[in-house]
C-alpha cells in the first residue's frame, strides 16, 4: 500500500483533558472531557474532531460520486453526529450522517448518498465496526 497522505498528531497531558497538535501546526488545541461525561467541557474533544473529519470526508465523497455519475448538484451539505455509547463490552462510537442535496428527487439523492458511503475512506474504515446511519434530509 502506498500512502497518498499521512496526517500526524500528538496527544499530550492527560488524554481527554490534555492537548493535541498536528505535526504541521495547523491544529494546536486543548481537549477536555465534555460536561455530559462529567468533565469541564469548554474545549474540543475526540468525538467533535471525528465528527468534523467524517462530515468533510463524506461530503467530498458525495461530490465525487455526483461527478462520476454526471449528476449536477449544488448547495449540498453533510452533517455528522458522533456519539460515544456504552455497550456490554465497553465504549464504542455510533455515527449519524445527514445529507442535504437540494432540488434532487429523494431516491436519486439517496443513491448518491449510498454511493458516497461506499467511497468515503472514513466509511470504509468504520464499516462493520460502528453503527452508522446515512439519511437524506430535506433542505
Image (spheres, helix red, strand yellow):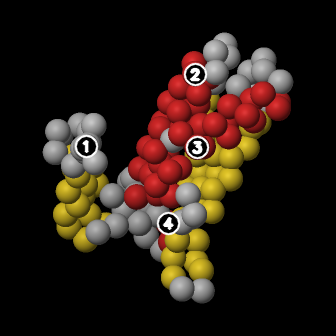
Mark 3 → mark 4, Cα distance in angstroms: 34 Å
Say few, some or many: other residues with alpha carbon within 10 Å of mark 2 (under 14 / 14 to 19 / 20 or more).
Answer: few
Residue 20, image x, y percentages? 25, 54
Give the residue at mark 2.
68
Choose the circle earlier in sequence order: 2 or 1: 1
The dot on residue 35 is 4
Task: Say what secondary structure mark 3 lies in.
Answer: helix
Residue at the extreme front of the image, as rendered: 1
Question: Would residue 106 be seen by someone viewing this image from the given angle?
Answer: yes
Give the residue at mark 1.
2
Seen in the image, is 11 located left or right of residue 127?
A: left
Choose the circle earlier in sequence order: 3 or 4: 4
Seen in the image, is 43 located left or right of residue 4?
A: right
Quadrant holding the C terminus: top right
- Decide: marks 2, 4 in contact (CB < 8 A)? no
- Decide: marks 2, 1 in contact (CB < 8 A)? no
Which residue sits at x=68%, y=31%?
112
Task: Say what secondary structure mark 4 lies in.
Answer: helix
Closer to the eye: label 3 or 4: 3
The dot on residue 118 is 3
Say few, some or many: other residues with alpha carbon within 10 Å of mark 4 (under 14 / 14 to 19 / 20 or more).
Answer: few
Q: Is residue 78 above or below residue 23?
A: above
Choose the circle earlier in sequence order: 2 or 3: 2
Mark 1 → mark 3, Cα distance in angstroms: 20 Å
Amino acid at each position: 500500500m502506498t500512502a497518498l497522505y499521512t496526517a500526524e498528531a500528538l496527544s499530550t497531558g492527560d488524554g481527554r483533558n490534555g492537548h493535541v497538535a498536528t505535526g504541521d501546526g495547523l491544529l494546536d488545541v486543548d481537549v477536555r472531557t465534555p460536561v455530559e461525561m462529567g468533565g469541564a467541557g469548554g474545549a474540543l474533544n475526540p468525538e467533535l474532531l471525528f465528527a468534523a473529519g467524517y462530515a468533510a470526508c463524506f461530503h467530498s465523497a458525495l461530490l465525487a460520486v455526483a461527478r462520476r455519475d454526471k449528476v449536477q448538484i449544488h448547495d449540498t451539505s453533510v452533517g455528522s453526529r458522533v456519539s460515544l455509547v456504552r455497550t456490554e463490552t465497553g465504549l464504542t462510537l455510533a455515527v449519524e450522517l445527514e445529507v442535504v442535496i437540494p432540488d434532487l428527487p429523494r431516491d436519486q439523492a439517496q443513491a448518491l448518498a449510498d454511493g458516497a458511503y461506499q467511497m468515503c475512506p472514513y466509511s470504509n474504515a468504520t464499516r462493520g465496526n460502528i453503527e452508522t446511519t446515512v439519511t437524506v434530509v430535506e433542505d
